Protein backbone atom coordinates (compact mmCIF):
# COMPACT_ATOMS: atom_id res chain seq x y z
CA UNK A 1 0.00 0.00 0.00
CA UNK A 2 1.20 3.50 -0.82
CA UNK A 3 2.60 5.43 2.16
CA UNK A 4 0.28 8.38 2.79
CA UNK A 5 1.61 9.34 6.23
CA UNK A 6 3.09 12.64 5.04
CA UNK A 7 -0.47 13.79 4.30
CA UNK A 8 -1.95 12.77 7.65
CA UNK A 9 -1.59 16.20 9.29
CA UNK A 10 -3.07 17.94 6.24
CA UNK A 11 -5.96 15.48 6.28
CA UNK A 12 -6.62 15.92 10.00
CA UNK A 13 -6.82 19.69 9.62
CA UNK A 14 -9.01 19.47 6.54
CA UNK A 15 -11.51 16.98 7.92
CA UNK A 16 -11.70 18.59 11.36
CA UNK A 17 -12.90 21.77 9.67
CA UNK A 18 -16.35 22.65 8.42
CA UNK A 19 -18.55 20.25 6.47
CA UNK A 20 -21.83 21.60 5.14
CA UNK A 21 -24.48 20.45 2.69
CA UNK A 22 -25.12 23.21 0.16
CA UNK A 23 -26.82 21.78 -2.93
CA UNK A 24 -28.97 18.90 -4.09
CA UNK A 25 -30.37 18.20 -7.52
CA UNK A 26 -32.05 15.40 -9.40
CA UNK A 27 -31.45 16.90 -12.83
CA UNK A 28 -28.41 17.79 -14.91
CA UNK A 29 -29.74 21.29 -15.45
CA UNK A 30 -29.88 21.83 -11.71
CA UNK A 31 -26.16 21.33 -11.05
CA UNK A 32 -24.41 24.13 -9.13
CA UNK A 33 -21.79 26.26 -10.89
CA UNK A 34 -18.39 24.59 -10.99
CA UNK A 35 -16.20 25.93 -8.19
CA UNK A 36 -12.96 24.46 -6.93
CA UNK A 37 -12.25 20.75 -6.89
CA UNK A 38 -14.98 18.11 -6.72
CA UNK A 39 -14.65 14.51 -5.57
CA UNK A 40 -17.55 12.09 -5.99
CA UNK A 41 -18.64 8.93 -4.20
CA UNK A 42 -20.40 6.37 -6.39
CA UNK A 43 -21.62 2.88 -5.61
CA UNK A 44 -24.44 0.39 -5.72
CA UNK A 45 -27.58 1.13 -3.75
CA UNK A 46 -27.10 0.37 -0.06
CA UNK A 47 -23.31 0.05 -0.33
CA UNK A 48 -22.92 2.55 2.51
CA UNK A 49 -22.09 5.79 0.72
CA UNK A 50 -23.95 8.09 3.11
CA UNK A 51 -22.49 6.30 6.14
CA UNK A 52 -19.01 6.72 4.68
CA UNK A 53 -19.61 10.44 4.07
CA UNK A 54 -20.58 10.82 7.72
CA UNK A 55 -17.61 8.82 9.01
CA UNK A 56 -15.15 10.57 6.70
CA UNK A 57 -16.27 14.03 7.78
CA UNK A 58 -16.64 13.01 11.43
CA UNK A 59 -20.32 13.94 11.43
CA UNK A 60 -23.21 11.81 12.66
CA UNK A 61 -25.82 13.03 10.21
CA UNK A 62 -24.25 15.14 7.46
CA UNK A 63 -25.58 12.70 4.88
CA UNK A 64 -28.89 10.91 5.39
CA UNK A 65 -28.61 7.17 5.85
CA UNK A 66 -31.21 4.47 5.41
CA UNK A 67 -31.47 0.70 5.29
CA UNK A 68 -33.72 1.12 2.26
CA UNK A 69 -31.79 0.89 -1.04
CA UNK A 70 -32.23 3.96 -3.21
CA UNK A 71 -32.74 6.50 -0.41
CA UNK A 72 -30.24 8.95 -1.93
CA UNK A 73 -32.19 10.17 -4.95
CA UNK A 74 -30.19 13.26 -5.87
CA UNK A 75 -26.65 14.41 -6.41
CA UNK A 76 -25.88 15.90 -2.98
CA UNK A 77 -23.05 18.43 -2.71
CA UNK A 78 -21.11 19.06 0.51
CA UNK A 79 -18.46 21.72 0.98
CA UNK A 80 -15.58 20.39 3.07
CA UNK A 81 -13.01 22.60 4.84
CA UNK A 82 -14.41 25.94 3.67
CA UNK A 83 -11.77 28.66 4.06
CA UNK A 84 -8.85 26.23 4.06
CA UNK A 85 -6.26 25.86 1.32
CA UNK A 86 -7.45 22.33 0.56
CA UNK A 87 -11.20 22.96 0.64
CA UNK A 88 -13.17 20.83 -1.79
CA UNK A 89 -16.67 19.69 -2.70
CA UNK A 90 -17.77 16.14 -1.94
CA UNK A 91 -20.57 14.79 -4.11
CA UNK A 92 -22.71 11.93 -2.80
CA UNK A 93 -24.27 10.30 -5.88
CA UNK A 94 -27.47 8.25 -6.18
CA UNK A 95 -26.85 4.54 -5.83
CA UNK A 96 -26.92 2.56 -9.03
CA UNK A 97 -28.44 -0.84 -9.53
CA UNK A 98 -31.29 -2.07 -7.35
CA UNK A 99 -33.44 0.51 -5.63
CA UNK A 100 -36.86 0.35 -4.01
CA UNK A 101 -38.44 2.49 -6.74
CA UNK A 102 -39.64 1.93 -10.29
CA UNK A 103 -37.36 1.04 -13.17
CA UNK A 104 -37.98 4.40 -14.87
CA UNK A 105 -36.73 6.23 -11.80
CA UNK A 106 -33.63 4.04 -11.60
CA UNK A 107 -32.96 4.70 -15.31
CA UNK A 108 -33.31 8.47 -14.74
CA UNK A 109 -30.83 8.36 -11.86
CA UNK A 110 -28.41 6.31 -13.95
CA UNK A 111 -28.60 8.80 -16.82
CA UNK A 112 -27.98 11.65 -14.37
CA UNK A 113 -24.93 9.90 -12.92
CA UNK A 114 -23.35 9.25 -16.30
CA UNK A 115 -24.09 12.76 -17.58
CA UNK A 116 -22.51 14.27 -14.48
CA UNK A 117 -19.42 12.10 -14.75
CA UNK A 118 -18.89 12.97 -18.41
CA UNK A 119 -19.44 16.69 -18.13
CA UNK A 120 -17.92 17.93 -14.87
CA UNK A 121 -14.53 19.44 -15.72
CA UNK A 122 -13.58 20.09 -12.08
CA UNK A 123 -14.20 16.48 -11.03
CA UNK A 124 -10.81 15.26 -9.79
CA UNK A 125 -11.68 11.67 -8.92
CA UNK A 126 -14.56 9.28 -8.34
CA UNK A 127 -14.26 6.94 -5.39
CA UNK A 128 -16.22 3.85 -6.39
CA UNK A 129 -17.54 2.13 -3.26
CA UNK A 130 -17.72 -1.66 -3.26
CA UNK A 131 -19.16 -3.81 -0.49
CA UNK A 132 -16.21 -5.83 0.84
CA UNK A 133 -18.47 -8.84 1.37
CA UNK A 134 -19.45 -9.08 -2.30
CA UNK A 135 -16.67 -7.60 -4.43
CA UNK A 136 -17.15 -6.31 -7.97
CA UNK A 137 -20.52 -7.05 -9.57
CA UNK A 138 -21.66 -6.64 -13.17
CA UNK A 139 -23.19 -3.21 -12.59
CA UNK A 140 -19.97 -2.05 -10.91
CA UNK A 141 -17.99 -3.15 -13.96
CA UNK A 142 -20.33 -1.19 -16.23
CA UNK A 143 -19.64 1.95 -14.20
CA UNK A 144 -15.89 1.32 -14.37
CA UNK A 145 -16.21 0.89 -18.15
CA UNK A 146 -17.96 4.25 -18.37
CA UNK A 147 -15.33 5.95 -16.24
CA UNK A 148 -12.56 4.48 -18.38
CA UNK A 149 -14.32 5.62 -21.55
CA UNK A 150 -14.82 9.14 -20.17
CA UNK A 151 -11.21 9.23 -18.86
CA UNK A 152 -12.43 10.08 -15.34
CA UNK A 153 -9.92 9.04 -12.67
CA UNK A 154 -11.34 6.64 -10.09
CA UNK A 155 -10.26 4.57 -7.10
CA UNK A 156 -11.96 1.59 -5.46
CA UNK A 157 -12.93 1.94 -1.80
CA UNK A 158 -14.21 -1.13 0.03
CA UNK A 159 -16.97 -0.51 2.57
CA UNK A 160 -18.10 -2.71 5.48
CA UNK A 161 -14.60 -4.22 5.70
CA UNK A 162 -15.25 -5.17 9.32
CA UNK A 163 -17.86 -7.68 8.12
CA UNK A 164 -15.27 -10.14 6.82
CA UNK A 165 -12.07 -11.53 8.32
CA UNK A 166 -8.57 -10.23 7.68
CA UNK A 167 -7.69 -13.11 5.35
CA UNK A 168 -10.76 -12.83 3.11
CA UNK A 169 -10.36 -9.03 3.08
CA UNK A 170 -6.75 -9.27 1.90
CA UNK A 171 -7.83 -11.72 -0.80
CA UNK A 172 -10.67 -9.40 -1.87
CA UNK A 173 -8.25 -6.50 -2.20
CA UNK A 174 -5.80 -8.60 -4.20
CA UNK A 175 -8.51 -9.85 -6.55
CA UNK A 176 -9.84 -6.35 -7.24
CA UNK A 177 -6.40 -4.86 -7.77
CA UNK A 178 -5.66 -7.58 -10.30
CA UNK A 179 -8.99 -6.90 -12.03
CA UNK A 180 -8.35 -3.17 -12.46
CA UNK A 181 -4.63 -3.17 -13.21
CA UNK A 182 -5.13 -2.68 -16.96
CA UNK A 183 -8.01 -0.23 -16.71
CA UNK A 184 -6.75 3.13 -18.00
CA UNK A 185 -8.54 5.44 -15.54
CA UNK A 186 -8.19 3.27 -12.42
CA UNK A 187 -5.93 4.20 -9.52
CA UNK A 188 -4.08 0.94 -8.82
CA UNK A 189 -4.55 0.55 -5.05
CA UNK A 190 -7.71 -0.30 -3.10
CA UNK A 191 -8.64 1.31 0.23
CA UNK A 192 -10.58 -0.79 2.76
CA UNK A 193 -12.85 1.06 5.19
CA UNK A 194 -15.46 0.50 7.87
CA UNK A 195 -17.83 3.31 8.80
CA UNK A 196 -18.79 1.36 11.92
CA UNK A 197 -15.28 0.93 13.37
CA UNK A 198 -13.51 3.83 11.66
CA UNK A 199 -10.92 1.53 10.11
CA UNK A 200 -9.37 2.98 6.95
CA UNK A 201 -10.76 6.49 7.45
CA UNK A 202 -7.35 8.07 8.01
CA UNK A 203 -6.05 6.32 4.90
CA UNK A 204 -8.94 7.62 2.79
CA UNK A 205 -8.67 11.11 4.26
CA UNK A 206 -4.95 11.22 3.52
CA UNK A 207 -5.49 9.87 0.00
CA UNK A 208 -7.92 12.72 -0.65
CA UNK A 209 -5.47 15.24 0.84
CA UNK A 210 -2.73 13.97 -1.48
CA UNK A 211 -5.04 14.17 -4.49
CA UNK A 212 -5.94 17.77 -3.66
CA UNK A 213 -2.29 18.79 -3.28
CA UNK A 214 -1.36 17.04 -6.52
CA UNK A 215 -4.27 18.71 -8.31
CA UNK A 216 -3.14 22.13 -7.05
CA UNK A 217 0.52 21.63 -8.02
Image: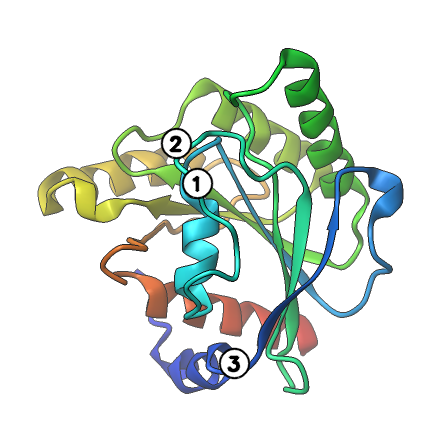
Which label is found at residue 66? 1
N-terminal-most mark, 2 or 3: 3
Work out whether residue 63 or residue 53 is closer to the camera in this orientation and state it: 63
Labelled pair 2, 3 in contact (Cβ < 8 Å): no
x then y, percent, for residue 128: 50, 43
Quarter holding residue 143: top right
Residue at 80% of width from left, 54% of height from top? 121
Which label is found at residue 34? none
x then y, percent, for residue 127: 52, 49
Residue at 70% of width from left, 14% of height from top? 104
Q: Which residue is identified by label 2?
A: 179
Q: Which residue is identified by label 3?
A: 14
Residue at 50% of width from left, 25% of height from top? 141
Quarter holding residue 110: top right
C-alpha span from label 2 to label 3:
32 Å
Q: Name above or below for residue 49 compared with residue 201.
A: above
Amino acid sequence: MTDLSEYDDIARKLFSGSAEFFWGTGSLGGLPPMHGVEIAFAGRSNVGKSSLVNALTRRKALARTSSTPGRTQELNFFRIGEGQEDAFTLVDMPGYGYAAVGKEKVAAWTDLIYAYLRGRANLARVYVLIDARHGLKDNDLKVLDSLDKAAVSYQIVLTKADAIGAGPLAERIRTIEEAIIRRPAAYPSVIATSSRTGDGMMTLQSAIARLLRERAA
